[in-house]
Amino acid sequence: MNKIKIGMMVLSLPPEKSTVVPQAVKASGLMGDCLEKSLNNAGFICVREKKAVQDEILAIESTKRLLSQDVDCLLYMTGSWLYSSIISAAALEAKFPLILFAPRHNDVSALSTTCILHGSLDELGVEHKFIYGYPDDKEVLKEIKTYAIASMVKKRLNNTRYGLYGGRCMYMYTGMPDLIQIRKLFGIETVHISEHILIEMAKNENKESVQKYLKNFKARFKNIKVSDEVLEKSIRLYFALKMSSESEKIDFAGVKCIPECVGEYCSHCLSVSLNNDNGFIVSCEADTNAAITMKILNLMSGKSAGSADVKELDRNTMILRLINCGSLPTDFAKNDNEIIWMEQYDSIVHGKKEGGATASFVCKPGKITLARLARINGEYIMQIATGEALNRSRKAMNGVRDRWPQIFIKLEADYSEFLKNCRSNHLHWVYGDYKDELIELCRLYNIKTTIN
């Protein structure tokens, strides 16, 4: 993940209007220096207005200057007693997520002032986060980080282009939202493309390029139980999706696959898997809500995001098994040697001779954050859960769709509540704990959350 850039300014009144003691002005400057240093040490890029901002005009100018430097979040620090009009003018101009930070210091006394500012922005309907504490306090920096990440995701998701290859898959209502709604809510533009274009591009791909890629592929993966002919078709589809997305300037995608692509050419499994490895998020079965959820998780973490079917949940152990049709990112495996490339099941390809290559493995252990966007009566909601991916061997697959990748997750959730909130066959995850960031992001979008 690219470093998050925070635009920062210290706000105060000029001496002739201020009611605070002189040493407070010096102290607020020191607090600003301390916060800037803490943010940089915490891994952010802090872009700071060096001089204190003391009136409405300067606040607006400084805000515009920070926004022009492509910041992901704004942070206004209260340096002393302050008129609400100063920050209100800047915030209304920015229309951008911002943090109100009140440093804890006896001379500065920023808390009471920031309470007024917080209430003023609420009255104006300006989105913001109110944080109070010492500038170098770990909990303060954690709060800033959580909000800044959410702000960054919202900003970077806006005006992205989503490539929808094919139409609704197998009548899944849950995968086909209102495309105008996602444009209005998330700022995502949808580019609708026929899958037949991908098939034609795959067939016409340069043979020399395909053979070169196949050679490198076989050098990397040692366990291959599928013919070169099937692998070559799968690789051709990988190239086709990659080139199409680049030519259409698509940021992430969803592919229908069943029945057109898998029935006429081969499955998308290898293509989806390797594109996701490369950071280009792709969902299966043209599941648009899956693609958006995965893109959010990817932006939030800088890591690959997963998508799989809910296979089983044990009431007593709260172990959840998720199974994917063969297209999980290969970096979810413990290592490349754990992956066995197999041929797609006949039942999926409807008896076709060549079904496409699938990556078969059990996902590596680690902390997991699960999420899924869904709608209730047209309004978005997000299911969020956390757990631990277990260190299981291939024996755990027990002949249950063992050509497909699987993950076993010990959930930190209530059995009934978790199932009540499952509104799709698909769930999505990323390695790491991003629950708080997802909650903050949903608050920015005014999306309700169910926390399991």
Image: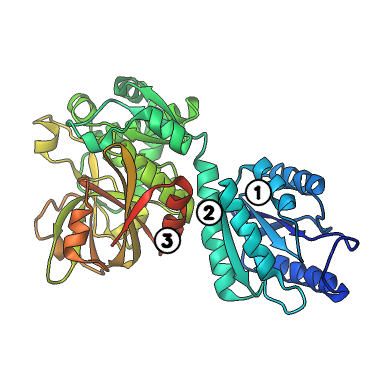
**Badge 1 vs badge 2, beta-carbon distance below 8 Å:** no
Nearer to the camera, 261 or 52: 52
Nearer to the camera, 92 or 76: 92
Q: Which mark is residue 376?
A: none
Horizontal and vertical percent position of residue 109: 72, 73
Q: Residue 71 carries which label?
A: 1
Label 1 and label 3: CA atoms lie apart by: 21 Å
Whether residue 188 appears in this view of the structure is no
Q: In the visual, does 251 lie left or right of 58? A: left
Whether residue 116 appears in this view of the structure is yes
Instruction: Please state, as top left, top right, bottom left or bottom right, where the C terminus lies in the image.
Output: bottom left
Q: Which amino acid does label 2 sit on?
A: Met
**N-terminal-most mark, 1 or 2:** 2
Residue that mark 2 sits on: 1
Nearer to the camera, 110 or 199: 110
Label 1 and label 2: CA atoms lie apart by: 15 Å
Dot 1 falls on a residue whose secondary structure is loop
Q: Which amino acid does label 3 sit on?
A: Tyr
**N-terminal-most mark, 1 or 3:** 1
**As drawn, 297 above or below 408:** above
Horizontal and vertical percent position of residue 322: 21, 55
**N-terminal-most mark, 3 or 2:** 2
Dot 3 falls on a residue whose secondary structure is loop
Q: Which of marks 3 and 2 is in front?
A: 3
Q: Which mark is residue 434?
A: 3
Residue at (53, 43) in percent of width and height: 156
Horizontal and vertical percent position of residue 90: 71, 46
Label 3 and label 2: CA atoms lie apart by: 14 Å
**Badge 3 vs badge 2, beta-carbon distance below 8 Å:** no
Q: Which amino acid does label 1 sit on?
A: Val
